[in-house]
Image (cartoon, helix red, strand yellow):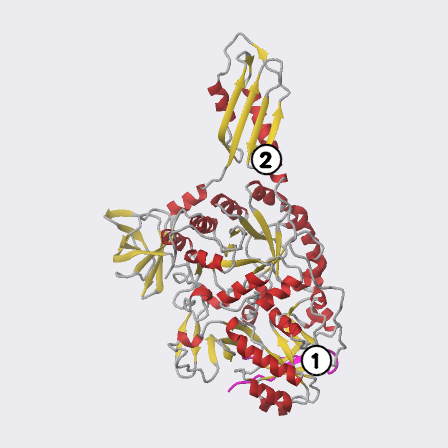
Amino acid sequence: MFSYTKSKLNMPKGNTRTPEILAPAGDELSLNRAVMAGADAVYLGTKEFSARAGAENFSASKLKPYIDFCHLYGVKVYVAFNTLIKECEISKAEQVIKEIVAAGANGIIIADIGLLPFLQDMPLPVHISTQAGVHNLPSARFFENLGADRIILARESAAEDIENISKNTSLEIEYFVQGALCVSFSGRCLMAQAMGGGSGNRGTCSQPCRLEYTLSNNRQEKQEYMLSASDLCLLGRLNSLLSIGVTSFKIEGRMRRPEYVAEAVRAYRSVLDGVSLPPNELPFLKRAFNRGGYTEGYLFSEKVMSTRVQGHTGEQCGKVLKTFAKGGYPYAEVQSSIPLTKGDGLKILRLGVECGGADITSAEQVGDGRYIIPVSEGVRAGDIICLTTDKSRADYLNRLEKRLPLTVLFKAKLGSPLFLYLESGNQSISYQSDFYPIESEGALLNDKEIVQQLSRLGDTPFYLHNIAIKTDGKAFIPKSQINRLRREATAALKEKLIAYFPAPQRKNLSKSSFLQSYSKKAGEIIVVEIQEIGQLAALPPSTTHIVYRPNEYCKNELSLLIKSAEKKVFLALPQMLTHRDDKQLSDLIDVLKECGAGIFAENFGSVTIARENGLSYGGELNIYNTGALSVLYDADFLVAAYELTEEEALPLLKKGVALFTKGHLPLMTLRHCPLKLLGGNCKQCSYQTPLSYINGKKTFRAVRGKLYDCSFTLYATQKTDKNIPQGKYNSYISLREWD
């Protein structure tokens, strides 16, 4: 259910930042539609390094004209440089960043901490991608201390944690309000790689979460799109987001159609400006794109999954009355509350599941709201029809136009050059022609004719707002001279507006030094992960560090295990920690301090927790390159990103970073509860053994971890087993098993 207020949006006390609508621009046309529809800022990717490699994207060396276009209309441009960078790509990445800076971008979005040392002295504001998993105050402080200006919060963030970040840091807060939801915790998904191709960390995700899976807990099972999340829509929650400190409302969709971008921007613009209410905009948004009827996400709802359909379901508009054949092709008579025309598209559902569709090549109206249309095979009477392509609406969106108001003063008198004063926004220009009017006995242009020539602004970004004409009534002025003056003056004003767009400026500078280095000796560190105290006896003799990852956190068991272990223990904290975990987390930290143990970090917030509590730490933090090591110089041990091959990880391994060599790889972490998809509930939790997700011959185990909140981690059932000669590298071994 969407909640909303009828009043204009109100900024919380003490918050002076202007709310921003941030739109996706996967290509030139989408960028144009975003600007014309009223976006305050756009984000786009380069062809070289982007988390949406499938989008058309932009060449970094050719960005300037697009940025100039946006700046002309007062729109900021943030460049998404949000993939993880391999060591062999660092030089190329640094060159591309220099091109981004030279093009005049207003910010750069990064996911790789290895870029922070290079960016520390640049004027370009640094935005931390949602791929970095920032969701609580410690993770926000980690990046604030490293000079970030803005964080793009993980979608799993809790309201209290967002407000805590807003009140206790100087960071700008950006949050996704519209578009696709990743089912995995941001930046921690290896599922595409496990399914045979692509990488969510490298911009080539093949979206295996949108496939059908059988979810089983050994007592019951269900086969649907069990990992497919609904699309997000927070159109009715903007006041709530503002009240907790979010000021940039981000629309997902660099892979979506330009009409979708325009529709989403227009809807949020209308609601933000108090022109319209969310319920009025929702139908149009649904037609543009929605998966599963929309969800209000982890922040406002527990229902985030769309297991019955995994694609665009549009807006429900009617039903099939009857079907028949005509000319050997299937047709249907349908009842629709929305007028249907040639060029529209329909998805047809039966019991909530897609059973057909219709690309409307003809629509014959046979009654009030009744149409004869071609449909796909298998459609039956009673099926539900949903409008997924609205041709007339798309045409309207593609005609949206934004022009700048132009104030004009035109002067012409004998003995003086033609003069034109133009003003738009906060810029003006005075322009003189090299033409001097002459006296003529013939007919002279009257004011109306002069205005007509100066109004010919169709090939400019301007529209005539005010005009004043001053002539002495004697000057002969050819229309061609007025037209030339208008063209030259408007072009000069356009360039001035672009040039005077505020230059990007860092608001935050690094409080940390990047000069320190991380270096360990190869072969001296063997990290072994266990899940229970009974596995201590199975530790390899060469073990130097123990990572303890319990299925359920208990301070007494933690204390007993640390005291029983002969090696130093590092407690693996959950990747997601919210304010609800604070009490239990505090108790665990007391145990770690008392026993001289450390923290195993898989989120940058856990690094901050370790540092602020004087604890040692190790971790796997998606480390792709040696630049990241200067940020994590004080770690006892680090593990190379799981996706890297041995060859790709070699520069890290030479620095003593450990390689994952044996065990079941963690593939993704889920915030939602899979048991609820099987009819379970928290009061009568039925979790006893790991759950299984099955797709064809591939099976993945989902294991619950519980502090205060639960999360579920999917593991590959096939073990990684790299035959590395002893002493060649530092290594990480997982002994995690299940029945």
Looking at the figure, which quarter contains the N terminus? bottom left
Is 475 in the magenta? no
Which mark's residue is nearer the viewer, 1 or 2? 2
Q: Which percent across, then down, holds residue 566?
A: 68, 89
Tell me the residue at 61%/26% (across/down).
431
Q: Amino acid at mark 1?
A: Ile
Return the residue nearer the eye: 529 or 424: 424
User: Is residue 680 shown left or right of residue 486?
Assistant: left
Return the residue nearer the eye: 214 or 65: 65
Q: CA distance from mark 1 to mark 2?
A: 66 Å
Range of residues picked out in magenta: 717-739
Residue at the spot of label 1:
724
Q: Which percent across, then down, holds residue 188?
A: 57, 69
The local secondary structure at tag 1 comes to loop
Residue at the spot of label 2:
427
Q: Quadrant of residue 723?
A: bottom right
The answer to whether marks 1 and 2 mark residues whose Cβ atoms lie closer than 8 Å is no
Looking at marks 1 and 2 on the same chain, the residue that comes earlier in the sequence is marked by 2
**Count of all numbered marks drawn on residues in the image:** 2
Q: Amino acid at mark 2?
A: Gln
Tell me the residue at 73%/83% (across/down).
726
The local secondary structure at tag 2 comes to strand
